[in-house]
């Protein structure tokens, strides 16, 4: 008997497996879905309609709705990405699909041009040509974009198309869908983990499905939080790569502008990695630009003139990257900002100092900042033989005592706590017999 060869099944991504098969399965942006269905029906009745331009954040269903419309209406699909439309030949393919009277099987053909905002920077003529083609199309046309208003090339599309802005999907709707998928796939999950995953999605359902798949078959809140940290780092790395490796001012500036990385955090990353990515000569020039950006930050703080942010941001990021005299092709990993590492390492010390200062300030009626300045004196007094009086008087806990003693002196801290409790009992006893007791 011959042995049967079993071919292992290729795993299917959740983004493909749970792609909406009907309008009922599509989540979010209900009004746009209804409008698009009506738009498609009018095309089916022979009534020519304006092209649709879907725009909004990634992962909210722009392309998915276009594909679903083609499927439900039985239309042939011609799909192209705007970043591929770089020459006359590619544009002519779009023209042929748009102007053709019928598809291969005699019906209409949906022309889908994805990410129209990714048209090449230098291709202004191409943008106008494509706009003219879709305007005169004999077939339904849908275009998608993430950022509709960030590029002047898109002005023609804004006038000839019916604009539909996709809102971010509500996290509760995403969470409900994730639970359904987990139940179908027998994935164990913590309820709080699903909520956190949905909240972290920022309305991007597609990326959340990928995260869900990567975390299965057991999803915990800790896993989700670790995933969120990794994603933040990846976002920083992609921006830094564009800054230090890019060579087009407009593209770098746009990339930085659209980044979700806070400006002050990004500047710290840039500052840390200049000497790692550039040689000494280029580093000197880059730091010069960085310092000029810092001058504007100072002016913002002094004058509260926040319109200077565009100057400080540009000088500290885009200008730094383009200041290099040559391209650096070798790969050098980006380094986490040492300042942030040291602040993170000292966060517990700063928290203890703040806690002690509040207790002292409340007791002696001074400001917390004054208590911080005089803390050296308090540390000195904690070395005396009356230290338990301070512990009781200011209600210090074990960690605060160890901090004032200047290090890991757990045994000494516990001794002082014990003495402070004994002192408290003594005071209570003496008060009960109307005897006067003093802490200090």
Image: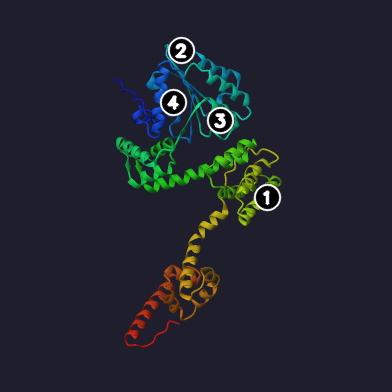
Q: Nearer the viewer, mark 4 or mark 1?
A: 4
Q: Which residue is mark 1?
A: 292
Q: Nearer the viewer, mark 1 or mark 2?
A: 2
Quadrant of the drawing holding the N terminus: top left
The mark found on residue 66 in the picture is 4
Q: Is residue 404 above or below residue 329?
A: below
* Mark 1 / mark 3, whichever is N-terminal: 3
* Mark 4 / mark 2, whichever is N-terminal: 4
How dense is the environment of label 4, judged by Cα within 10 Å: few (below 14), some, or many (20 and up)? Answer: many
The x, y position of residue 200, in whole percent, is: 43, 44
The x, y position of residue 85, in whole percent, is: 57, 23
Q: Which residue is mark 2?
A: 102
Check contact, mark 4 vs mark 2: CB within 8 A: no
**Residue 297 in view here:** yes
**Viewer-nearest residue: 89 or 12:** 89
The mark found on residue 365 in the picture is none
Q: Nearer the viewer, mark 4 or mark 3?
A: 4
């Amino acid at each position: 008997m011959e042995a049967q060869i079993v071919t292992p099944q290729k795993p299917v991504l959740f983004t493909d497996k749970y792609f909406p098969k009907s309008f009922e399965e599509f989540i979010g942006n209900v009004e746009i879905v209804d409008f698009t269905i009506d738009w498609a029906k009018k095309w089916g009745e022979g009534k020519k309609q304006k092209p649709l331009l879907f725009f909004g954040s990634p992962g909210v269903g722009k392309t998915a709705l276009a594909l679903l419309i083609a499927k439900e209406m039985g239309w042939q699909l011609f799909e192209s990405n705007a970043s591929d439309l770089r020459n006359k030949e590619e544009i002519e393919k779009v023209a042929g699909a748009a102007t053709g009277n019928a598809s291969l099987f005699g019906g209409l053909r949906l022309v889908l041009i994805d990410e129209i905002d990714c048209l090449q920077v230098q291709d202004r003529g191409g943008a106008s040509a494509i706009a003219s083609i879709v305007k005169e199309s004999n077939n339904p046309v849908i275009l998608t974009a993430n950022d509709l208003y960030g590029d002047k090339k898109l002005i023609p599309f804004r006038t000839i198309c019916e604009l539909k802005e996709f809102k971010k999907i509500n996290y509760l709707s995403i969470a409900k869908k994730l639970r359904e998928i987990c139940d179908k796939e027998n994935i164990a999950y913590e309820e709080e983990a699903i909520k956190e995953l949905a909240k972290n999605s920022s309305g991007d359902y597609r990326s959340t499905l990928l995260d869900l798949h990567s975390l299965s078959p057991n999803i915990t809140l800790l896993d989700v939080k670790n995933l969120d940290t990794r994603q933040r780092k990846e976002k920083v790395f992609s921006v830094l790569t564009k800054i230090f490796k890019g060579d087009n001012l407009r593209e770098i500036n746009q990339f930085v502008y659209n980044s979700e990385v806070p400006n002050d955090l990004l500047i710290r990353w840039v500052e840390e990695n200049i000497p790692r990515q550039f040689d000494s000569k280029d580093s000197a020039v880059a730091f010069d630009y960085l310092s000029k950006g810092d001058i504007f930050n100072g002016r913002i703080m002094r004058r509260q003139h926040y319109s200077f942010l565009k100057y400080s941001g540009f000088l500290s990021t885009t200008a730094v990257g383009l200041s290099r005299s040559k391209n650096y092709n070798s790969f050098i990993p980006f380094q986490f900002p040492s300042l942030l590492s040291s602040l993170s390492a000292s966060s517990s010390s700063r928290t203890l100092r703040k806690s002690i200062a509040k207790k002292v300030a409340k007791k002696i009626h001074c400001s917390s900042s004054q208590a911080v300045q005089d803390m050296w004196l308090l540390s000195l007094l904690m070395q005396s033989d009356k230290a338990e009086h301070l512990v009781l008087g200011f209600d210090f806990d074990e960690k605060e005592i160890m901090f004032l003693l200047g290090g890991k002196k757990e045994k000494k801290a516990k001794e002082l706590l014990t003495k402070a409790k004994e002192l408290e009992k003594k005071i209570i006893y003496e008060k009960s017999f109307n005897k006067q007791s003093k802490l200090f």
